[in-house]
Amino acid sequence: MKRIQILGSGCAKCRELAANAEAAARALGLAYELEKVTDVAEMMKFGVMVTPALAVDGEVKVVGKVPGVEELKVILS
């Protein structure tokens, strides 16, 4: 099971990243758990200074942008 984490305050871009990540995971037929990390201290543990950010299985993959579903499918596979 993939662990997908969205790091950010919950802003519009964070919500868009979460929606795109879910759409990509569903399109790939992945078993996944989506977690929204809004605590600044937790984000700092990832070394993230700019949001939104995406971590997959604890590894940061995207920082400061909202990739489309197709790009996220590549990242998640």
Image: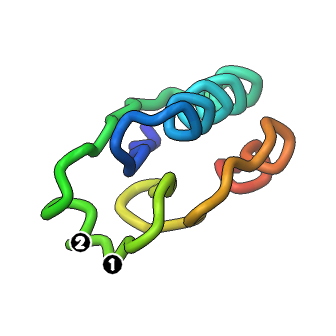
Asked whether 64 or 57 is in front, the reply is: 64
Q: Amino acid at mark 2?
A: Met
- Vertical placement of residue 60 versus 35, above or below: below
Asked whether 33 or 54 is in front, the reply is: 54
Q: Which residue lies at the image location 65% right of the left edge and 49% below the top edge?
A: 76
Q: Which residue lies at the image location 39% right of the left edge and 73% below the top edge?
A: 49
Residue 71 location (% of width, % of height): 82, 50
Q: Are the residues at dot 2 and dot 1 in contact (C-beta closer than 8 Å)?
A: yes
Q: Which residue is mark 1?
A: 47
Please give left or right for residue 45 compared with residue 67 in the image. left
- Vertical placement of residue 30 versus 8, above or below: above
Residue 32 location (% of width, % of height): 46, 31
Quarter residue 20 falls in: top right
Residue at the left extreme, as displayed: 41
Graded by Cα atoms within 10 Å as few (under 14), some (14 to 19) or many (20 or more), the crowding at tag 2 reads few
For the residues labelled 2 and 1, the Cα–Cα distance comes to 5 Å
Q: Which residue lies at the image location 68% right of the left edge and 48% below the top edge?
A: 66
Residue 73 location (% of width, % of height): 76, 43
What kind of element bears circle 1? loop
Asked whether 50 or 24 is in front, the reply is: 50
Query: What label sits on residue 1 in the rendered view?
Result: none
Residue at the front extreme, as displayed: 11
Looking at the picture, the colour scheme in use is: rainbow
Q: Amino acid at mark 1?
A: Gly
Please give left or right for residue 55 compared with residue 27 in the image. left
Q: Which residue is mark 2?
A: 44
What kind of element bears circle 2? helix
- Vertical placement of residue 65 versus 26, above or below: below
Residue at the bottom extreme, as displayed: 47
Residue 46 location (% of width, % of height): 30, 71
| Figure quadrant of the N terminus | top left
Please give left or right for residue 71 compared with residue 22 in the image. right
